[in-house]
Every structure is written in C-alpha cells, then in structure tokens.
Amino acid sequence: MSVIDLPALWRPENHQALFRLILDATARPGQGADLSPHLGGAHAALGALATFCDNTQTLADLTGTLTDADWRFLDVARAPADQAAFILAQGSDAPTFQPRLGTLDAPEGGATLIVKVASLTEGQPLILTGPGIKTTTSLHVTGLAPDWLTARARWCADFPMGCDMVLADDTSVAILPRTTKITEG
C-alpha cells in the first residue's frame, strides 16, 4: 500500500497535524481541539490513539469499537485495562476498572484514558482549575456518566501519580491532565 492509498487518518501529514493540535490542547486543559480536518471521517478518539500509540505501547479497548484494520494501523499491543498504557472507554458507561496510576518513582507510568462522549460543546459545565488555566474555565460535556468524575478524582488524588484523560466526541478532543481539578457547575 502506498501513501496515496492510505486512509486520510493514517497519512503522515495528518499525523503531524494531529500531534500539533493535541499538544496544544494538552497545554490548555479543557479547551477543545477540532481534529476533523485530519480525521478523514474517523472518530476523534481514533485520531488521538493514532497520535499516542505505537508498537511500544499497550491498549485496552473497552468499547469494542476498534476494527481489525484500526489495530493493524495502530500497531499497539492489546492489554487488560489494569495493565494498559492507554484505555479506550465509553463515557456513558460508568468505569468498572482500575487504571495504572504510576508510582512515586515513575509517575509517567499512569495510564491515559481516551473517553468517548456525545458532545464537548453541550450539556452541564464542568469547572476546571489547575496548571495551564488562568483562573477557571468551563467545559460542557454530554455523554459522561457522573461516576467518571468520582473515579478520576480518586485516581488522581495522590499526585504525581494518577491518570490523564482525553475526552473525545466525534470530531474534537479536550485534554484533562491529572493536575486539573474538576467540579460540576
């Protein structure tokens, strides 16, 4: 397969653009990043995974939505949620797993959760504070079960350990590093 034959999401120029957009969104917690020009119709969660994953990483797909072709392109090893570096989950389903949180000596071992939600522009606001946010900012989310916020607060209670979260609707992502505090608005 030549580069011309690759689906748009997997083309190098789109990977580079996605990386820049996601890096910028990471520096601005809760600010949505529109990935749609580079997804080729794929879900934003897959765009985030395409940016994060390679053959040195592990992934748990709790949604069951990744196709065989997605797995081949991601070139990532499958793992159970408690061992995976990346976890793809459905926001409407309450979390029933314990992600890796890293250790005091190696906090970077904490998992990154990519959580599919219905919308990042509608719904009740989440009020965010922490590094990268001047005072406060709000993020409107629909399709995120309330148990996610409770679980995330528990997982991130012992900084620097914790997990980072990427919320993804069809076309956009918002990054919530473990340092971001969330309250319901």
Image (tube, helix red, strand yellow):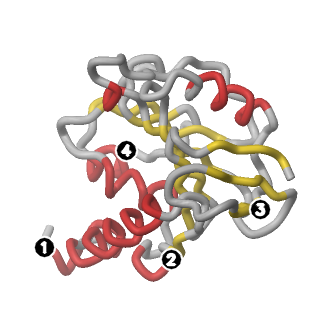
Dot 4: within a 10 Å radius of its alpha carbon, few (fewer than 14), some, or many (20 or more) residues? Answer: few
Q: Please give left or right for residue 47 compared with residue 183 in the image.
A: left
For residue 36, which numbered disc appears in the image? Answer: 2
Q: Please give left or right for residue 15 compared with residue 96 in the image.
A: left
Question: Which residue: 64% across, 22% down?
Answer: 154
Q: Please give left or right for residue 24 compared with residue 170 in the image.
A: left
Q: Secondary structure at mark 4?
A: helix
- Mark 2 or mark 3: which is in front? 3
Q: Tell which circle, 1 or 3, labels the residue nearer the N-terminal end.
A: 1
- Mark 4 or mark 2: which is in front? 2
Q: Tell which circle, 3 or 4, labels the residue nearer the N-terminal end.
A: 4
Q: Which residue is mark 3?
A: 140
Which residue type carries mark 2? Ser
For residue 2, which numbered disc appears in the image? Answer: 1
Rendering coords of residue 134 (x, y %): 59, 64
**Separation of disc 2 and disc 1 at Cα?**
23 Å
Question: Which residue: 20% across, 72% down?
Answer: 12
Q: Please give left or right for residue 139 compared with residue 47 in the image.
A: right
Residues marked 2 and 1 touching at CB (< 8 Å): no
Q: Tell which circle, 2 or 3, labels the residue nearer the N-terminal end.
A: 2
Q: Which residue is mark 4?
A: 68
- Of residues 52 and 138, the one nearer the viewer is 138
